């Protein structure tokens, strides 16, 4: 999990589905907490586009479905889920500088036995 954060710029800023603002340190903690709480994850892409702003800045938009399967047996779905990523080239390497996600969360509770 830690390896992916080498691709985030120091000035990274993100906004979550409930208008919560976060920096790379909070995003790292939240991502680690999330992936420690799930047993599986599935992403289904509906659409993906790239907008080249300059030779060093690209905006990527993705629409699809997120499905998280928790270790407690619950299934959490965002359908549709929308993501916008801003990437910039820093010292010859592409880095995320912006992230925004939105979607409606639906949780299907595990059946109690």
Image (cartoon, rainbow, N blue to C red):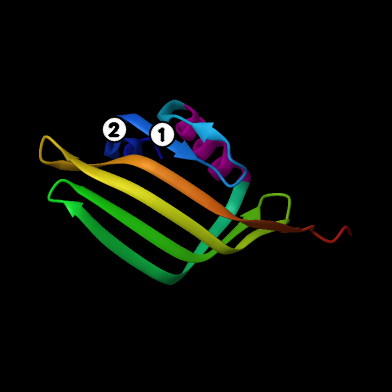
Toward the front, the furthest residue is 53
Residue occupied by mark 2: 9
Query: Which secondary structure is most common in the magenta stretch?
Result: helix
Secondary structure beneath dot 2 equals strand
Of residues 10 and 76, the one nearer the viewer is: 10
Residue occupied by mark 1: 13
> Residue 30, percent across and down?
54, 35
Relative horizontal placement of residue 58, taking residue 76 as reference (left or right): left
Asked if the magenta segment contains residue 109, the reply would be no
Tell me the quarter of the image containing the N terminus.
top left
Tell me what residue is drawn at x 32 percent, y 46 percent: 86
Q: Is residue 25 above or below residue 75?
A: above
Q: In this view, does 44 lie above or below 94?
A: below
Tell me which segment is drawn in magenta.
26-37
Relative horizontal placement of residue 108, taking residue 49 as reference (left or right): right
Tell me what residue is drawn at x 28 percent, y 62 percent: 50
Toward the bottom, the furthest residue is 46
């Amino acid at each position: 999990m830690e390896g992916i954060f080498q691709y985030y710029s120091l000035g990274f800023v993100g906004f979550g589905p409930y208008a919560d603002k976060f920096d790379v340190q909070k995003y790292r903690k939240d991502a680690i907490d999330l992936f420690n709480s799930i047993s599986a994850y599935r992403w289904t892409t509906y659409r993906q586009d790239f907008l080249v702003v300059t030779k060093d800045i690209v905006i990527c938009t993705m629409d699809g479905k997120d499905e998280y399967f928790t270790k407690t047996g619950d299934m959490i779905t965002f359908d549709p889920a929308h993501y916008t990523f801003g990437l910039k080239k820093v010292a010859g390497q592409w880095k995320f500088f912006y992230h925004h996600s939105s979607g409606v969360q639906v949780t299907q509770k595990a059946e109690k036995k």
